[in-house]
Image (tube, rainbow, N blue to C red):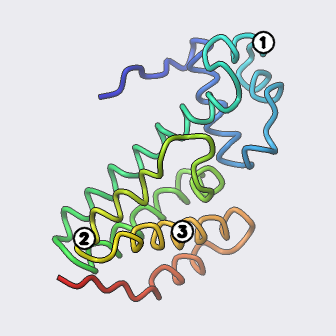
Amino acid sequence: MREWIPVSTSPKGRLALAAVKEFGARSFDEVTVGELAAAADVTTGALYHHFDNKLGLYAFVRSDVEQRLLDRMEGAIAAGGEGSAAVKAALLVGFDFAVREGFPQLLGAPPAGTEGDRLAAMLTASTAPAPAVLGRVLAAAWRAALAAVAEGSEPDDARAALLALDVRIAS
């Protein structure tokens, strides 16, 4: 259960909403603390007060967005049953969500400064009894498709690349 739901009118909420937008459009390194504070109409001190630093704000936003992604992907797996078709459906559902919501930049890169890779862990659990590395490989391919969109590729082309993956899970 979430400990906090951002209220858009609070300084913390405005920072979170600004960070979703900024990190969704540009990489972590390209976004500055000053830009985040200005976009949220707060001082940089407010950012440090609520999140300690830019990485803390990024981790907070990334965790929230990633949880929304994982909820959708896990739902697709549950609806699709077991096996390869369900995992492939989850990859496509997650990709469509990330593109539609403007998160290719944010989710197209591996987590920066956060503990573990929840996407790879979920895919590993979903592809068992296949070797554990399959989840990491699928997460990397999924992120590469999103990164391609963030770099200017057509979403339909990146989606077609995901569709072309031949995921086989031995049972």
Residue in view at x 55 percent, y 60 percent:
99
Q: Where is residue 115 in the image (x, y as percent from the top left)?
A: 50, 41
Q: Which of disc 3 and disc 2 is earlier in sequence?
A: 2
Q: Distance between the residues labelled 1 and 3?
A: 36 Å
Q: Look at the picture and state if 124 lies above or below 105.
A: below
Front residue (pair 164, 111): 111
Label 1: element kind: loop
| Residue 145 on image: x %, y % | 58, 71
Between disc 2 and disc 3, the foreground one is 2
Q: Residue 153 vs residue 59: left or right? A: right
Label of residue 140 in the image: 3
| Residue designated by label 1 | 43
Position of the N terminus, as image quadrant, is: top left
Q: The residue under label 1 is which amino acid type? A: Thr
Dot placed on the residue nearer the N-terminal end, 1 or 3: 1
Q: Distance between the residues labelled 2 and 3?
A: 17 Å
Which of pointers 1 and 3 indicates the residue nearer the eye?
3
Q: Is mark 2 on a helix, strand or loop?
A: loop
Residue that numbered label 2 is attached to: 128
Of residue 109 and residue 75, the one placed in the foreground of this image is 109
Q: What element carries label 3?
A: helix
Q: Is residue 6 left or right of residue 29?
A: left
